[in-house]
Image (tube, rainbow, N blue to C red):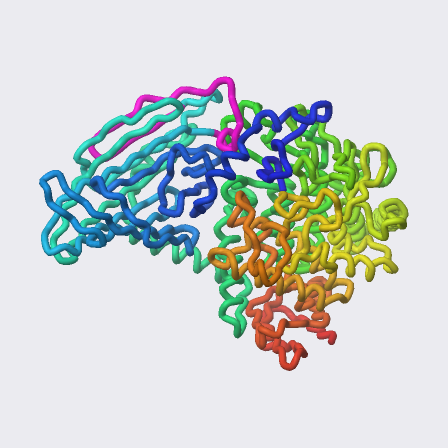
């Protein structure tokens, strides 16, 4: 997926061209085994904007778990330990939920407890409810209920520790030297933990309470700083209650302490505000509702997760972060694909994504960051290591596909909005991106885009399958750079054709004609070079010696989406993608099970990725294979039902669906929520409905809409095409789907329904 692919395909997370084990590989060597070992117990995640918490299912952060739990902000872990103990009791977890993404709710009961005065407190007689909200800070409310026939006075101990680790350290990176922890500050109702980084930035975790604690004690140790806080809770008999509220504030750099601490919202008021904010944001999206309540929940989960992962940036608007916990930062490729997937919901995310990436487009030749003029960034990090240039992510540009995907999203946004002024706003960035494709992306002038890292801390692979062993041949040899991967050639073909269309709109006919010629030349060369007649499939990639990597992977399915596949080979390709070696029953695998390197447990060589399947489904639909697209939509819907909250994760294992194995096998360190996994639901839906907008011509074409047999009715209310808003209804009866317009508002629009 990205720099830091925590998958089993990786010995590490980066590569230097002259040293297969160098760069980020060495920095992060050894991090994965601990992550795999410690994630067995599950985790819960809550997030808002740049702040998020990854905890154990009981809501706690165990300092020695090494599984990435913590309170994070902008790539810094502000708490790595957050424990709670009621007297000496072993609390029993009753339930744990993060259904709303900004709120976690954990319920406990007590075990047998003998107090210091000899009082026996039977098990199951105390209930402790822990509610945690996240906004610009964390606010937690603890409520203890006593069901005994006698009152109690109980001690509640909270322990907070912070290591202020950079995210790359959390994932296993080793550093020769770190900054210094600051003296712990304790006063009547506050704890302050601090760290002065080698970058000169002061990072603080400030914890406040709504009452004075009984004791405050510093709890420092090797590699962390912290404090223990003890409260005395008095609870009456027969259902008596005692409550405690506290909040955790993170500060970085020059942020003003007084202004941040002045406002101390109560839990209930903060909860109401967050609920209202979420409702207000959802009102701006297309409202999707069907007669299948479970499917509605799947769609709502995808929408909730997108909302959770999106931050509104002050200068450019909404931008979706890639995923929790490892990738809560801006990515190029991930955000572009997610925005494309979710245009059905509205254009705001796409516009914010394009503006952000245009503003940060490559300007210089910088080997350390793999930056080149016109190139779209890969990943931005904000932690201490990025500031010190111990990693190149400030930002890092090691991606081959973000630049053509940027152009594709510009075009698709125009098709949905007809906003020519927005295209003109981005035109300089568009021209720079086209320049990069020809001048830098095509390194040897053969018409194909290749990549090879120049950074000593760069990635080996710059495509979406960027783990070290993702471009691997049937002989298990890893492709040496420069590598030309198959899907990127399709992206470039599609991008140039789309930009030719925009040139026609802008009366730039000479430029448009040139782009069309280049696209057609690329298509011809692609089908001559990548097709393997002896194997009857397309090569995964070309290595640095232009030798084909003779492995069948899902990447070729993206070429259906882009339209670069020769028409006479489309049927063969569709049959391959839906064959038993590629299609697991839960989705299309990243690699055919007939290939020697296939491994259903691997990150990229046999797993199933929802976003990958959504792009393939879009390609199937575009070529008229609607029932095959429906097959993918249904398989991923069934998979979603097997995961917590009906949430599609980043990926899952590629084991076949069978009577013996009737549910998908989770991948242990997959991100969840994850942006383009969430966006997959909406692109899959668009594909089976056949929605083809052309806002500039004031029309929406609906091509061969097809609902599954478990959906009888589906409504899309508030669908925006240009300045028009539509309410559409799709009805399925006896295997036949019909579509009709329920209402229109705004500008005029023609809806053409093709059966």
Q: Position of residue 26 (x, y in %)?
A: 60, 25
Q: Is residue 514 visible?
A: no
Which residue is drawn at the image coordinates 71% and 45% (left, top)? 427
Q: Residue furthest bottom?
A: 734
Q: Is residue 751 placed above or below 121 in the rendered structure?
A: below
Q: Nearer the viewer, residue 219 or 690?
A: 219
Q: Residues in magenta?
A: 166-195
Name the one closer to the observer, 82 or 101.
82
Is 179 magenta? The answer is: yes
Q: Quadrant of residue 99?
A: bottom left
Where does residue 710 sit, x and y in percent of width and height?
A: 58, 73
- Name the outermost residue toward the top: 177
Check the picture and name the quadrant holding the C terminus: bottom right
Number of marks in picture: 0
Q: Is residue 238 above or below residue 8?
A: below
- Name which residue lies at 56% across and 67% down: 718
> Observer-nearest residue: 30 or 265?
30
Residue 67 visible, this angle: yes
Residue 65 or residue 484, whichever sits in front: 65
Q: Which residue is at the far front?
A: 660
Left or right: 725 with respect to 236? right
Q: Residue at x 27, y 26 (%)?
A: 218
Q: Is residue 678 above or below residue 25?
A: below
Q: Residue at x 89, y 50 (%)?
A: 533
What percent of the width, then of the height, locates residue 36?
A: 51, 39
Does the stretch in magenta take in 76?
no
Left or right: 212, with 357 as reference point: left
Residue 479, image quadrant? top right
Position of the N terminus, as image quadrant, is: top right
Q: Position of residue 144 (x, y in %)?
A: 22, 50
């Amino acid at each position: 997926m990205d720099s830091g692919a925590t998958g089993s395909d990786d010995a590490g997370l980066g590569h230097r061209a002259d040293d297969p084990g160098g760069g980020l590989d060495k920095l992060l060597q050894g991090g994965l085994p601990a992550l795999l070992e410690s994630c067995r117990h599950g985790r819960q995640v809550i997030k808002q904007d740049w702040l998020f918490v990854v905890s154990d299912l009981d809501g706690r952060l165990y300092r020695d778990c090494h599984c990435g739990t913590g309170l994070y902000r902008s790539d810094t872990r502000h708490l790595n330990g957050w424990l709670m103990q009621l007297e000496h009791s072993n609390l029993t977890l009753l339930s744990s939920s993060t259904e709303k993404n900004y709120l976690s709710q954990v319920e406990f009961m007590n075990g047998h407890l003998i107090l210091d005065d000899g009082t026996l407190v039977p098990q199951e007689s105390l209930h402790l409810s822990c509610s945690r909200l996240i906004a610009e800070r964390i606010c937690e409310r603890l409520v203890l209920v006593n069901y005994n026939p006698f009152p109690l006075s109980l001690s509640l101990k909270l322990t907070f520790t912070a290591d202020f680790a950079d995210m790359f350290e959390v994932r296993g990176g080793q550093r020769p030297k770190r900054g210094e922890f600051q003296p712990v500050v304790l006063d009547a109702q506050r704890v302050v933990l601090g760290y002065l980084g080698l970058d000169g930035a002061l990072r603080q975790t400030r914890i406040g309470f709504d009452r004075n604690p009984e004791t405050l004690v510093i709890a420092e140790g090797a590699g962390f700083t912290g404090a223990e806080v003890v409260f005395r809770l008095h609870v009456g008999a027969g259902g008596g209650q005692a409550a405690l509220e506290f909040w955790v504030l993170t500060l970085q750099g020059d942020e003003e302490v007084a202004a941040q601490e002045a406002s101390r919202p109560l839990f209930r008021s903060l909860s109401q505000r967050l609920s209202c904010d979420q409702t207000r944001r959802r009102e701006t999206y297309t409202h999707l509702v069907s007669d299948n309540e479970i499917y509605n929940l799947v769609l709502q989960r995808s929408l909730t997760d997108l909302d959770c992962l999106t931050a509104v940036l002050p200068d450019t608007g909404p931008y979706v972060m890639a995923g929790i916990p490892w990738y809560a930062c801006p990515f190029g490729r991930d955000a572009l694909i997610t925005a494309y997937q979710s245009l059905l919901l509205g254009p705001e995310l796409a516009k914010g994504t394009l503006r952000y990436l245009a503003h940060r487009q490559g300007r210089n030749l910088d080997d350390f960051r793999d930056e080149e003029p016109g190139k779209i960034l890969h990943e931005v990090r904000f932690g201490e290591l990025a500031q010190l240039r111990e990693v190149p992510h400030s930002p890092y540009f090691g991606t081959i596909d973000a630049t053509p995907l940027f152009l594709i999203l510009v075009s698709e946004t125009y098709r949905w909005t007809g906003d020519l002024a927005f295209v003109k706003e981005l035109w300089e960035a568009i021209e720079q991106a086209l320049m990069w494709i020809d001048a830098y992306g095509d390194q040897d002038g053969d018409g194909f885009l290749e990549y090879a890292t120049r950074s000593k801390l760069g990635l080996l692979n710059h495509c979406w399958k960027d783990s070290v062993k993702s471009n691997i041949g049937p002989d298990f040899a890893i492709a040496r750079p420069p590598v030309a991967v198959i899907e990127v050639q399709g992206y470039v073909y599609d991008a140039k054709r789309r930009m030719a269309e925009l040139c026609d709109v802008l009366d730039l006919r000479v430029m448009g004609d040139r782009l069309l010629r280049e696209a057609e030349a690329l298509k011809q060369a692609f089908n001559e070079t990548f097709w393997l007649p002896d194997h009857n499939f397309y090569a995964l990639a070309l290595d640095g010696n232009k030798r084909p990597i003779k492995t069948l992977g899902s990447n070729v399915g993206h070429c259906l989406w882009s339209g670069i596949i020769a028409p006479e080979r489309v049927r063969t390709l569709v049959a391959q993608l839906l064959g038993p070696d590629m299609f697991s029953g839960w989705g299309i695998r990243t690699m055919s099970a007939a290939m020697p390197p296939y491994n259903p447990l691997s990150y990229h060589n046999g797993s199933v990725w929802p976003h990958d399947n959504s792009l393939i489904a879009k390609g199937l639909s575009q070529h008229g294979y609607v029932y095959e697209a429906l097959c993918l939509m249904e398989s991923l819907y069934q998979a979603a039902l097997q995961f917590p909250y009906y949430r599609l994760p980043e990926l899952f294992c590629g084991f076949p669906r069978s009577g013996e194995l009737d549910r998908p096998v989770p991948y242990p360190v997959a991100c969840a929520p994850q942006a383009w996994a969430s966006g997959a639901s909406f692109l899959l839906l668009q594909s089976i409905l056949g929605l083809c907008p052309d806002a500039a011509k004031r029309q929406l074409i609906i091509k061969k809409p097809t609902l599954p047999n478990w959906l009888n009715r589906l409504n899309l209310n508030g669908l925006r095409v240009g300045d028009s808003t539509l309410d559409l209804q799709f009805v399925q009866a006896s295997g036949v789907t019909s579509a009709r317009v329920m209402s229109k508002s705004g500008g005029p629009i023609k809806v053409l329904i093709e059966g």
